[in-house]
Image (cartoon, coloured by chain):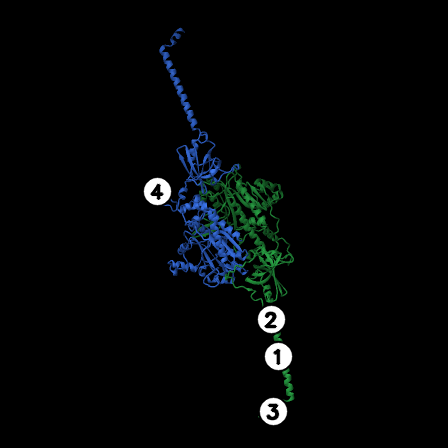
Chain colours: A blue, B green
Amino acid sequence: MSSADSSDAPTKSALKKAAKEAEKAKKKAEKAAKAMEAEQARAAADEDYSVGRYGKLPMHQSQSRQNRERIDISTLTAQNDGTRVLVRARIQTSRLQGNKMVFLNLRQRTNTVQALMSVTKDTISKQMVKWAGALADESIVLVEGDVKKSPEPIKSASVSEVEIHILELWLLSGIESRLPFSLEDASRSETAPEVEGQFNRVLLDTRLNNRVLDLRTTTNQAIFKLQHAIGNLFRDYLNANGFIEIHSPKLQGSATESGASVFKVDYFKGNAYLAQSPQLAKQMAIAADFERVYEIAPVFRAEDSNTHRHMTEFVGLDLEMAIEEHYHEVRDLIDGMFKAIFEGLREKYAHEMAVVRQQFEAEEFKWKEETPVLTFKEAVNLLVEDGVDREVLDDINTENEKRLGRIVRAKYDTDYFIVDKFPLALRPFYTMPDPEDPTLSNSYDFFMRGEEIMSGAQRIHDPDFLCEQMRTKGVDPDSMKGYLDGFRLGCPPHGGGGIGLERVLMLFLKLNNIRRASLFPRDPKRLEP
Amino acid sequence: MSSADSSDAPTKSALKKAAKEAEKAKKKAEKAAKAMEAEQARAAADEDYSVGRYGKLPMHQSQSRQNRERIDISTLTAQNDGTRVLVRARIQTSRLQGNKMVFLNLRQRTNTVQALMSVTKDTISKQMVKWAGALADESIVLVEGDVKKSPEPIKSASVSEVEIHILELWLLSGIESRLPFSLEDASRSETAPEVEGQFNRVLLDTRLNNRVLDLRTTTNQAIFKLQHAIGNLFRDYLNANGFIEIHSPKLQGSATESGASVFKVDYFKGNAYLAQSPQLAKQMAIAADFERVYEIAPVFRAEDSNTHRHMTEFVGLDLEMAIEEHYHEVRDLIDGMFKAIFEGLREKYAHEMAVVRQQFEAEEFKWKEETPVLTFKEAVNLLVEDGVDREVLDDINTENEKRLGRIVRAKYDTDYFIVDKFPLALRPFYTMPDPEDPTLSNSYDFFMRGEEIMSGAQRIHDPDFLCEQMRTKGVDPDSMKGYLDGFRLGCPPHGGGGIGLERVLMLFLKLNNIRRASLFPRDPKRLEP
């Protein structure tokens, strides 16, 4: 045992070695501890403390109802500084700044607001910022944030006084395919010069093929708000003047009215035809004592015209009224209605009109308190004075209509005027001739920026004379028995007119193509979407 | 010569004879003079001193304009006693009293007034009275006369305080064929007992074949004023709630939506189809950020149904809106809209409603400030409690709908209620399932007098889930690419509904047949007039 004891006794060198190793182990442990600490620090730094503040929401199935208000960004001003808001909006564009900050341009219809977030201890993690920066344009998000007054006006957004500092950001509806074009491109001015390689214009056909996206531009949001406004102003004026709204059938038993082509429909075992206008129905409503009627409804034209101003289906604003003494009662009422529409747009829709003008530059539409009325003869004389050959002026064609528009604008300073007393030969069979000159008629057209927007007249209410005129124009009275019967049972003198809603909208805003004034336009080559 | 003189000398007898003859001649002359006097007196008595006060006017061609006011008879009260008026009206009926007096019942839309004239020296000749008495019912006349307060209320006219004493009477538009029925017959109460030989009822088909005449009854004038009112109240409510009106095309490139049949149209060298509803278009408008939209437009259904409540073309009142938290936002808004319509009718159209009730007797339509909402399950339970076999209640058929209407009326004292949470299997592919029970859906129907008047739901806005549901219901997603594309580019949660205008009108007034609520109804057998 002693020998073992003696052999186990430490030597000086051994002691030294042990001390060295202990020192080493200590250092190693210290290093490990430090590494662990660093690791922990790193882990702490990477922890996503924003969980529960952002992400994709489950599909909205009306899971709950909390009645929390969501705000309309157009109402935000500096006065809202410091308030907390909840906003549903599209991401128009997003921009990451480094990896600590993101700017979102949020859009609601014709308005945009700037929203932003930056990495903030305990609230906004870098993961959250990164996720926000990666959201596709056109995503729909739900944003909670604080409104902050901006030190200087924000030029990139329509809401310029404030921005939103994001606290929560939720994806409500994502984008599942590549955008066919950006809304920025689709919203560019149509008149600004295009610089090579700088930006793209979006062709009308591309827009129409992707109409849902195209309709989201602030321009289109404004255009269709104005379309809505015109319909409402039309109705309000007529309601206030004792009219009632009717709804006449678009399915007809026979192809009525001469001239324009009609669409044929398979109708059970026979055929039906789509109404080209509510002309006959609204006249029958007058024979039925409705006195003053209007209708807003689709009108169908099977004409293979591929112009800037023809569609196969458009919205007709039609009206018809009994006449007491003179058809000018009708002409004057329609004139009053147009002026009420123009005034209503100017007074209540200045914002929308300004939005449209950013893309479609145009001189503001001009009209006079007293609308100039030319007779057809006077209009012809103006054109002749301007150098047009009188020989070609039996009718005024589209080109000469535009020329007349320019002449009238120069002479009367108006984009809106009336031509009265058209030659009878140019009008449909149901037009009442002038009482003195049988080659003229009690009819009128209304013009905007040199294009016809409404055609109307006193109609023939006498059934025998109507039959006579039908035969003169090659229409068989037997083919229109139901219509004629109405007059045989007594009908007051009456007149009216028909307006193309999209045409008024196009010309008022100078959109240059009627398809831009139609939600989902239809022409001989387009039935989709 | 003397012999001749002597022979010519008169004898006594000859003188006597001559004197006698002279006497005779004198008497004859006197007689002749007397006869002539009598003749002159007779002629004087027969002279038509009313020429220039009556007769048929030349065809109205707007020969002149005098700006003379013509009055609305509904404005006449005892306060107008003694005033001279000019009136254009129909002769509803006329009655000659002897050959010296004539009574005319004059009609303007829903109102009538008594007018009369009697032979008066220097002004009203017997010829004029005779002519007036011979004017056909339904002739349109221009009457000038003096308003006279009536000593007692006139029961045969709606204007009861006054009558018009005619000074001039002009025929503006005559009747050129026999009336197929009298307006008196056409206006009789539908519920009054019919006494053999006493009067005729006019069959609905006869009315519709002669719709222009039929529409002139005060009942129909009131019905279509109420139709106009419903449309306006619908619009006013939605406009006030941030909606905009859209116009979507009725011509479609493909036969969309499963189930109901569509009409096929010859479209140049191909085919088009008539939209069965604006469902897809209004959803696309939501995907295009319109937020809240409505449309009033014809809807076409190629269903060979010949019932009291089906037509092949009717007027759809459609709406669609983005949802914030819950689809009940939509359900509640539609509920508010219906109540606004009912209230608007009650407040502003009491006269028209009373006019209709004279022909279509019905208990006044009842609704509650708080509309009862049943779940589909609760509705089924109510029917089971009432004795219906639960086995047949996978769906609620028309008969059981009516029964449910009676049960709800007895229990809640209302003709108007909502059923919510329909089984998913009963609804179209685009309906959002309930978040908890996948056999149910976020959908609702609205009922009036036990008939469904509106169907609506939250729609699926998620494109992948929508494709999945399409396939489940046998719809090929590729056939609806344009529609799906809208959702692929991000679409907010949304819901809406569609209402049949004529159905609301029919049920509110209890007209019992939808054709009575349509101006010129269309069904599988009727395309005219």
Taking depth in this image into account, of A252 and B87 the one nearest to the observer is B87
Position of residue B167 relative to residue B493, above or below, is below
- What separation in Å lies between label 3 and label 1 (alpha carbons)? 32 Å
Which of pointers 3 and 2 lies earlier in the amino acid sequence?
3
In the rendered image, which residue does mark 2 sit on? Answer: B44
In the rendered image, which residue does mark 3 sit on? Answer: B7
Q: Quadrant of the N terminus of chain A?
A: top left
Classify mark 3: residues with Cα within 10 Å, few (<14), some (14-19) or many (20+).
few
Residue in the image at 41% along x and 26% along y: A42
Q: Are marks 1 and 4 in contact (CB under 8 Å)?
A: no
Name the secondary structure under disc 1.
Answer: helix
- What separation in Å lies between label 3 and label 2 (alpha carbons)? 53 Å
Task: Indicate the position of residue A464 as horizontal and vertical percent values.
Answer: 51, 63
Q: Nearer the viewer, mark 3 or mark 4?
A: 3
Name the secondary structure under disc 3.
Answer: helix
Task: Indicate the position of residue B271 as horizontal and vertical percent values.
Answer: 45, 50
Q: Mark 2 is on which residue type? A: Ala
Q: Mark 4 is on which residue type? A: Gly
Classify mark 4: residues with Cα within 10 Å, few (<14), some (14-19) or many (20+).
few
In the rendered image, which residue does mark 4 sit on? Answer: A197
Residue in the image at 40% along x and 36% along y: A95
> Is residue B339 left or right of A107 when viewed as pictured?
right
